Amino acid sequence: MKPESFESAAGALSAAAYGSPVVRAVNFHNTPRHREAELERQIARLGREFSSVNEEELDAFLATGRWAKPKPGVIIAVYEGYRNGYDVLRPILERHGLVGWFFVITGFVNEPVSSQFAFAASHDIDMETREYDDGRYAMTWEEIRELSVRHVIASHTRTHVSLATLTAGDRESEIVGAQQDFVRHLGRRVRSFVSLGGPEYGNDDATDRLIDLAGYQLVFSNLRVQRLRPWLGA
């Protein structure tokens, strides 16, 4: 979501949630320090009115249709792998007992600090401010490993491009290569995947085969989350 919609979206989400024990989602991208007060108010409201959701809880809900917590669940999806997701948003989430789902573009993280701003500009990764004097705008793998102890780490492809525009080899790099990056740096596969534009699983056989090859279990798209298979572990 765009920064100007932070608080209005929280209100709309909470107003719509009651009456059925469902899991909802709210999306964040860039969360700069100068919007910290807005973020604090929104996350505080979500923490009062919703329950956190981790991958095991979402898996069980999608498999059974039953939600065990007294409050509806909220998936807080944090896209791209911005450094301020770690520096600014993470501590706010933790103060209010919520789990973040960090959908990381692995190529952004792997990019040298000196060219991260240029990488972002050429890969549809919006930069609201130049807020870091050292020029690093992506999380580090060390920060991602720390996040993974309490939060969800998920794949947002390798370079944030539309899969439909790619050759077979480049598409494999985006889907399978991103998973290989996680295995290399986290020591395990990640379970959840979303690509730019959020197409569903089932739209393209070649893409689906690569998602299966990479071993993703959950595919996020614009309107739903698909559980492809039971999770067999890392």
Image: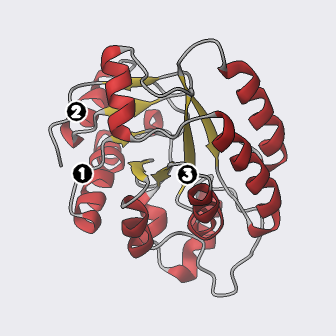
- Dot 2 falls on a residue whose secondary structure is helix
On the image, the x and y values in percent for residue 30 come to 68, 57
Measured as percent of width and height from the top left, residue 12 is found at: 78, 27
The residue carrying pointer 1 sits among few (fewer than 14), some (14 to 19) or many (20 or more) residues within 10 Å by Cα, namely many
Q: Label 3 sits on what residue type?
A: Gly
User: Which label's residue is closer to the chain start, 3 or 2?
Assistant: 3
What residue type is disc 1 on? Answer: Arg
Q: For this rendering, which residue is in front, 184 or 68? A: 68
- Circles 3 and 2, Cβ within 8 Å, touching? The answer is no
| Inter-mark Cα distance, 3 to 2 | 33 Å
Q: Which mark is residue 97?
A: 3
> Which residue position holds label 1?
189
Does residue 177 appear to the left or right of 42 in the view shown? left
Q: Is residue 45 left or right of residue 119?
A: right
Q: CA distance from mark 1 to mark 2?
A: 12 Å
| Residue 167 visible in the snapshot | no
Q: Residues within 10 Å of mark 2 (few under 14, many from 20)?
A: some
Residues under labels 3 and 1: Cα distance?
Answer: 25 Å
Is 218 in front, or is 16?
Answer: 16
Give above or below for 77 relative to 13: below
Q: Tell me residue 196's x, y (percent).
A: 52, 40
Q: Residue furthest front?
A: 70
**Comparing labels 3 and 1, the label whose residue is closer to the camera:** 3
- Residue matched to label 2: 212
